[in-house]
Image: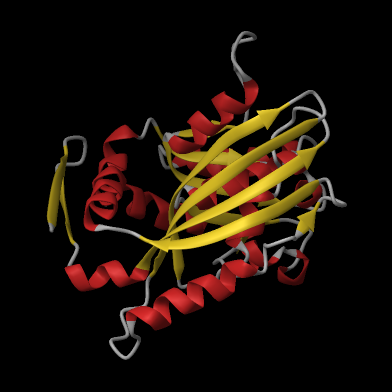
């Protein structure tokens, strides 16, 4: 199966070849959940699933279906499309499937947020050619939908730090969008945030003692990871050991070195 899409903005031709044997490395992960509390988003749910998998797994897409909801209780199902990026021919289809099932099985009867979110009915299944092909084509088309180069996630009190990052981006003519600033009063807050992340090519998170404990920052990181965004942690007054596991595995930069990082980002965005 061969897919080719022309990015009219950059005039780049993206080609993806999916062989029949590659289907062994793609899976659909289904995770049921129950949540007690108010109507805020399920902060940490996506991250909890992502953290089950080693770094060689790619998350293509995620879906969240609500099956029952009241003011204080919600039940739903998360569905993820997952790829094992290893192409080691010594692994059989059974090996790929068995490893994926082991990685995600820890979520069965697992709870987070002091028991307010409970996972159940975790299932792993293989994908057929039509399903994977559709997802691959959708993935290739993302490049034509970007409205911004970068989405910036930060804690509410990190104004000085974000000013430094913004100035470096402005100097290089990198377009950016900042959290929820400038949203119209009538817009749904969460939907707008997700739309801004989806329409940005890369994702910067300013990591400070405050932002690392912010439920909104972690919610935004989880969605960016699920969307397969390039995530750049920018550290200020924190070290690598202070980062959660899902950020520690990424290439981070300290804020005093961000200007050099931004130059590399500019090259990557223009490719």
Q: Residue at x 35, y 48 (%)?
A: 269
Number of marks in the rendered image: 0
Which quarter of the figure has residue 48?
A: bottom right
**Place of residue 159 in the rendered image (x, y in percent of width and height, measured from the top left):** 73, 36
In the picture, measured across the screen, residue 178 lies left or right of residue 28, that is right
User: Residue placed farthest to the bottom in the image?
Assistant: 90
In the picture, measured across the screen, residue 174 lies left or right of residue 184, that is left
Viewer can see residue 222 = yes
User: Residue placed farthest to the right in the image?
Assistant: 114
Colour treatment of the image:
secondary structure
Q: Residue at x 60, y 17 (%)?
A: 183
216 or 20: nearer the viewer: 20
**Residue 269 vertical position relative to residue 75 in the rendered view, above or below:** below
**Residue 233 vertical position relative to residue 116 in the rendered view, above or below:** below
**Place of residue 109 in the rendered image (x, y in percent of width and height, measured from the top left):** 74, 60
Q: Residue at x 56, y 69 (%)?
A: 53
**Residue 145 vertical position relative to residue 242 in the rendered view, above or below:** above
Viewer can see residue 205 = no
168 or 14: nearer the viewer: 14
**Place of residue 235 in the rendered image (x, y in percent of width and height, measured from the top left):** 68, 58
Q: Residue at x 57, y 75 (%)?
A: 102
In the picture, measured across the screen, residue 234 lies left or right of residue 72, that is left
**Place of residue 95 in the rendered image (x, y in percent of width and height, measured from the top left):** 41, 83
In the picture, measured across the screen, residue 266 lies left or right of residue 36, that is left
Which quarter of the figure has residue 167?
A: top right
232 or 101: nearer the viewer: 101
67 or 250: nearer the viewer: 67
Q: Quadrant of the N terminus?
A: bottom left
User: Residue placed farthest to the top in the image?
Assistant: 186
């Amino acid at each position: 199966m061969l897919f080719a899409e022309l990015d009219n903005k950059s005039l780049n031709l993206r080609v993806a070849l999916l062989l029949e044997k590659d289907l062994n490395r793609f899976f659909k992960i289904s995770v049921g959940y129950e949540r007690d509390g108010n109507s805020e988003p399920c902060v940490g749910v996506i991250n909890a699933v992502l953290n089950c998998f080693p770094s060689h797994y790619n998350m293509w897409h995620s879906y969240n279906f609500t099956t029952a909801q009241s003011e204080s209780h919600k039940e739903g199902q998360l569905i993820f499309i997952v790829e094992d990026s290893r192409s080691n021919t010594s692994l059989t289809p059974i090996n790929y499937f068995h490893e994926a099932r082991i990685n995600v099985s820890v979520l069965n009867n697992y709870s987070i947020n002091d028991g307010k979110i409970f996972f159940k009915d975790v299932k792993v299944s293989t994908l057929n050619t039509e399903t994977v092909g559709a997802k691959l084509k959708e993935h290739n088309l993302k490049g034509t939908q970007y409205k911004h180069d970068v989405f910036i996630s930060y804690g509410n009190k990190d104004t000085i730090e974000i000013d430094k990052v913004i100035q470096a981006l402005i100097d290089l003519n990198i377009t950016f969008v900042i959290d929820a600033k400038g949203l119209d009063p009538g817009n749904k807050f969460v939907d707008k945030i997700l739309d801004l992340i989806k329409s940005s090519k890369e994702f910067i998170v300013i990591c400070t003692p405050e932002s690392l404990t912010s439920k909104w920052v972690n919610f935004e990181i989880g969605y960016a990871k699920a969307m397969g965004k390039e995530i750049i942690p920018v550290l200020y007054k924190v070290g690598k050991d202070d980062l959660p596991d899902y950020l520690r595995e990424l290439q981070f930069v300290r804020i005093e070195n961000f200007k050099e990082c931004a130059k590399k980002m500019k090259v990557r965005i223009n490719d």
